[in-house]
Image (tube, rainbow, N blue to C red):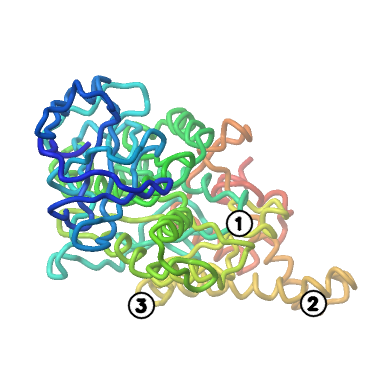
Amino acid sequence: MHSPFNANAIGKITEVHGPVVVIACDPLPPIKRALVANNNRSDSNANPDGRSDVKGDDKRNGKSDPYLFEVHQHLDKKHIRAVTLHRASGLYRGMPVFDTGAALNVPVSPECLGRVVNMFGEPLDGGPSIKTNDFRTIHAAPVKLSDATASAEILATGIKVIDLLCPFVKGGKTGLFGGAGVGKTVLIMEFMHAMASLHRGASVFAGVGERIREAHELWQEMQAAGVMEQSLLVFGQMDESPGVRFRVGLAALTYAEYFRDTLRQQASLQKEVLLVMDNIFRFVQAGSEVSSLLGRMPATVGYQPTLISELAELEERIISTQQGDITSVQAVYVPADDMTDPAVNAILGHLDTKVILTRAQAGKGIYPAVDALQSSSKLMDSYTLGARHYKIAEGVREHLARLHELEDIIAMLGIQELSAQDRLVVLRARRLQKYLTQPLWVTASHTGIPGTSVALDDALNDCEAFLQGRYDDLSEEQCYMRGNMSESTTK
């Protein structure tokens, strides 16, 4: 969990404000240093000179009650303010605090794949502890600019609407935007399935502020889907300290960096790593909570004044190198469905692809509930995608946009009042809208419909056929919740 701490206490707690403590110490530890304390009021574990006899192994086997802190502020020459990374109950004034000698570290090993751990690398799945001598700090510096690699290549997901209209950038960052209940987590699980089945890579899931029920369901469903063996789940649960929720994303990113640097050495795996964060908005909320407890004045709409720099500290480490690629998918809760929210805008600035999920789409039975007109990718140009892909994608968007423009007229007057050309466009757009739905692997046990992955070439061929009118004789139901059209037309 952290480096062995020094025998001599560097200070004592003087104030406790919930999960934030003020510590009088000499010398002052640097910012982001990990400190540790033990809840033991008896004198049996303290020597007359103030030294503690409690060892690291003793606290792990239950002989003491450890607390871990992270230094966030230097108040003056003798006092610091630190955030508790465990529960705050049991803290008291005068509690001796020890220096670990390093920032927070997590154990890394190939054996981490298939496991469920907390932000300290401790198992949550009932399995044995991760045995390794290799530790990495969660506050590692970003890769040097000269070592970073850029990519303009598509990372296929097997999901038609995404690969066609808002493709993932290999080694890039994608945001899934939407309110509660529109299917962000389900889509994330499908991406992890695609990473394991299509790319034979590894996935790291960061559960930032996850509910215990959701975490358990995710774990069970991933086991049922057969993708758990190539995945690592790192949870900072909703009932934990804001310091944990604030740092669990960095812990998961540290594991992703480790897999990026080592997967290439394993013959059984390719060098693709998928880093999934659900939900990065809770990371912002945890930072706001920590900021308030540290006494900082709130900024726009009550968010912390350090919002931009805190996001950058996380996002700028998600980068690809010659050793491998990290592709990030981040679920983003949109407060009150307001895309102008400062936190949402700050996250948008780091993304290569944005996938917008809407209640309007879900209300029509369109799953995944992707709004094709609002979603976009920086790869959407003819040079990167190729002339054919770009032309077909633009044709699909034009048909869907025309359908959206005419929806009110159709609702009031009926489709018969449209011109023949508009009526033809609307009918083709409706079929395309239904075609862009898809049964997912991770929901097969709930829906009874087997999941399917559709290759990009198949999706392009089908959409081209829709635009040219070759499927004008099919009903909308025949296009709904299918894979490629060659399969649906033979059923």
Q: Whole-percent x and y of residue 361?
A: 67, 58
- Three-letter amino acid code of the residue under disc 3: Tyr
- C-alpha separation, residue under disc 1 versus residue under disc 3: 34 Å
- Name which of mark 1 and mark 3 comes first in the sequence: 1
Disc 2 element = helix
Q: CA distance from mark 3 to mark 2?
A: 35 Å
Drawn side of residue 439 relative to residue 410, left or right? left
What numbered label is drawn on residue 383? Answer: 3
- Please indicate whether residue 7 sits to the left or right of residue 314 in the image: left
Residue drawn 29% across and 63% down?
313
Mark 3: which secondary structure?
Answer: helix
Q: Residues within 10 Å of mark 3 (few under 14, many from 20)?
A: few
| Vertical side of 388 occupied by 262: above or below | above
- Circles 1 and 3, Cβ within 8 Å, touching? The answer is no
Which numbered mark, 1 or 2, is in the foreground of this view? Answer: 1
Q: Which mark is residue 351?
A: none
Image quadrant where residue 225 sits: top left
User: Closer to us: mark 3 or mark 2?
Assistant: 3
User: Which residue in the structure is indicated by mark 1?
Assistant: 179
Amino acid type, residue under disc 1 in the picture: Gly
**Residue 459 higher or lower than 209, as above or below:** below
Earlier along the polypeptide chain: callout 3 or callout 2?
Answer: 3
Q: Nearer the viewer, residue 60 or 206?
A: 60
Q: Name the quadrant of the C terminus.
A: top right
CB under 8 Å between discs 3 and 2 = no
Q: Residues within 10 Å of mark 1 (few under 14, many from 20)?
A: some
Residue with the mark numbered 2: 420
Give the position of the N terminus as an image quadrant: top left
Alpha carbons under labels 1 and 2: distance apart: 38 Å
